[in-house]
Amino acid sequence: MNSNSVDTTASVTQVTRDDWLSLEQSDAPKSLLQWMFVAFAVVFAVWHIATNLLINESVLWQNAIHFSGFAILASVIFPARVFGRQSLAFDLSYGILVAWAACWVIASESRIYADTLAVTGQSWQFNVWDWFAGFVLIVAAIDFSRRVSGWVIPILILISISYILFLGESLPGVFRAASLPLDDVMFRTIYNDEGLFGILANISSSNITLFMIFGGFLVISGASDFVIELSKIVAGRVRGGAAFVAVLSSALTGTISGSAVANTASTGVITIPLMKSSGFRGRFAAGIEAAASTGGQLMPPIMGAGAFVMASYTSIPYSTIVAVSVIPAFLYFLSVAFVVRIEAVKHRVGEGIDMTVNRAKIIAGAMTFVIPLTVMIYFLMAGVTPSFAASTAIAVLIVVSWIAWLIGRYTGATDMQTNVMNVKRIIEACLLGMRGGILTAVLMVSIGVINNAIVTSGIGNGFSLMIAQWSQGSLVIAILLIGLASLVLGMGLPVTAAYIILAILCAPALAGILADTIIVEQLMAGLTDPAQAAMFMLVDSPHAAKVMVGMTLEEASALMAAVPFEVAMTMRPMLVDAEILMGFLLVAHLIIFWLSQDSNVTPPVCLAAFTAAGIAKSPPMATGFQAWKAAKGLYIVPLLFAYTPLVNGTFAEMCQIGFFALFGIYATNAIIARFSEGPLAIWHWPLLVSGAVLCFVPLHLMSNVLGALLVGTVIFLTHRRNQFFNATPSQ
């Protein structure tokens, strides 16, 4: 976030650019230009609501205007340096130029088609202004992504364009691709569904920005206060209550922002000092806050931008993705809570702190937080568009805030009267939503350049082939490779950007490996359909002759490993039901989405952990390692996705897996901490290990029950042992 001061034309007083999207006064009063900027941002927010509900606008025009507005906002809030200093005149002019270029290329689309058809057999017919506007947009995608997120995405954009222009034809093997002429690259980059103003831009303009605005309304209405007070009620009376408050508040705050860093910054200023005052070490407090805040992006119903991208790529309804993500999100937050419990008992901290609850804030917050969120979830589950659900929730929140204000005025509860959504607060909420939407909007549009290059060149198939060859059909190895890739990308990219790139490149390969498990089972039983069996006869494997009579697991796995990648892609739809294939694609995307979160808490670059360390005044790297230890659910739950029907099973199956997985996750945490409810004796270790393994066995009730009993026995015995050693004479 840039907070440098710049000169304005209205005053020689230095102002902070971040203040331009706020009604709060800095040391100097706002200039006319600043008030005009505020008005523009508010109108732009209202336009997003209106265009998704009332205005029937073409997708390209909607996406172009969306990028145009955020280009102006980004140019001011994230200023450039010209000859070593900032220039407001340059930034505004640059933003307006980019906005003009976006509108120009969309307005010129029909003319370009007509001119090209008139010159049959020739390349795309661009005039000078078309070329200029196109180059401005590509430069803007590079520049704005650099301003908001660093150099990684700009470098990827440059590599992507170079790859389809000339670089691809010089590479060997599966990464070789034919070069395209410049005019074709320009046209595809701008107008393709995978380009600048394609699918990703539409996700941002139609869904994500509205949820950002809704989050702004929740924050301004006092949702954060409600979350903290509610967390005190739920978790404030148990040992380690302050840390449990952090976990719970971060989970609930995740429904507002869907950003790990934003969650950490908003709730951490309250929860981290609260944890430290109750006896927790600074780095532990910061690590727990970072780990819990990371889970905010996994928490339905918003889940950051990931759920919207996932719905677009898989064609699975958004409501379905949100529904199957509920139990995994609970597993993650409870895994963090287990870390807190073990730490509190081990070091005898977390007690003796004032957990006084403001009842008025609870009542007011329950109305302005719970009711709008419930309405939004209802509409999402009913199958309406996310934009309609978010817009309706905003309207409900405004109405409910006035009802809460009237109740507060009648009863004399002043805390209920402060959060009424009057005109000033509505404007503040719109400005907050626009500020939060800059990063996402810029990245979603800019990544369109990379997405277009990947789809146009077919390099995604090359990456899929590489993963298939390196993993040799092993799910564990494939997940490990994707996890390492997500960690590397996450060092320089925001989580959403890393997920999108990995999903484009790796999701088909991972879904294919999952589908192959079904085919292996069919091969073991033997294929009765001669047409299906004939597909394996051309495979260079000694096991192909047994395809109709059945074979062992090892033989079936070896036969599938010998099937060429291209043949396997053709074979899977013929051997696996389409609905099952779609389910595997969702599982693959969820695995990648979860693994992409680890960059928030995994050193050497872990922004959420570093943000928490700044609040706690703790060593950044030590905090990062603590956050990584607390966030081990990011690695356990994806394995459950891969090896159990946690996503594609019935509701009863999902509940069974989730329930017994909790015992396994607790046992895993106890093993790592070498402590449960008390010190572990030597004979406790085999019980915990065996219990954890048995609890993770999918849908085997006897094994699960036995595993839970073993873990529960260790919990009971260590609790009794801890009571004995800590007993005082008076007791």
Image (cartoon, rainbow, N blue to C red):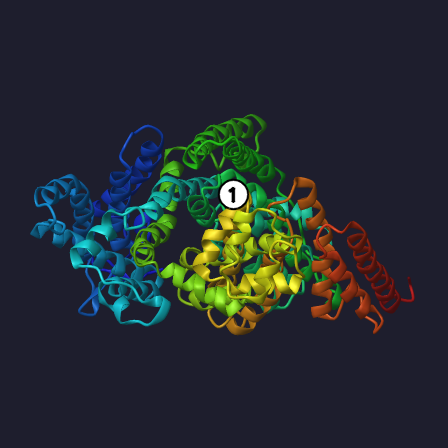
In this rendering, position of residue 206 left or right of residue 612? left
Query: Residue 274 versus residue 333: which sits nearer the camera?
Result: 333
Q: Is residue 375 above or below residue 63?
A: above
In this rendering, position of residue 709 left or right of residue 65: right
Look at the numbered disc 1 and give the secondary structure of its residue: helix
Query: In the rendered image, is residue 502 in sight?
Result: no
Q: Amino acid at mark 1?
A: Ala
In front here: 597 or 247?
597
Q: Residues within 10 Å of mark 1 (few under 14, many from 20)?
A: few
Q: Position of residue 81 (x, y in %)?
A: 22, 65
- Closer to the camera in the image, 210 or 283: 210
* 521, 591: nearer the viewer: 521
Q: Residue beneath label 1, please?
A: 578
The count of marks equals 1
730 with respect to 253 (left or right): right
- The residue drawn where x is 56% and y is 45% is 580
Q: Quadrant of residue 88?
A: bottom left
Q: Position of residue 27 (x, y in %)?
A: 31, 54
Query: Can you tell which quarter of the image residue 199 is in?
Result: top left
| Point 52% across, 73% down: residue | 621
- The answer to whether residue 433 is seen in the rendering is yes
Q: Quadrant of the N terminus?
A: bottom left
Q: Looking at the figure, which quarter contains the C terminus?
A: bottom right
* Image quadrant in which you'd find residue 40: top left
* Residue 728 falls left or right of residue 281: right
Q: Is residue 85 above or below residue 706?
A: below
Task: Give percent across and percent down for residue 141.
Answer: 26, 57
Where is residue 63? Give x, y as percent: 28, 43
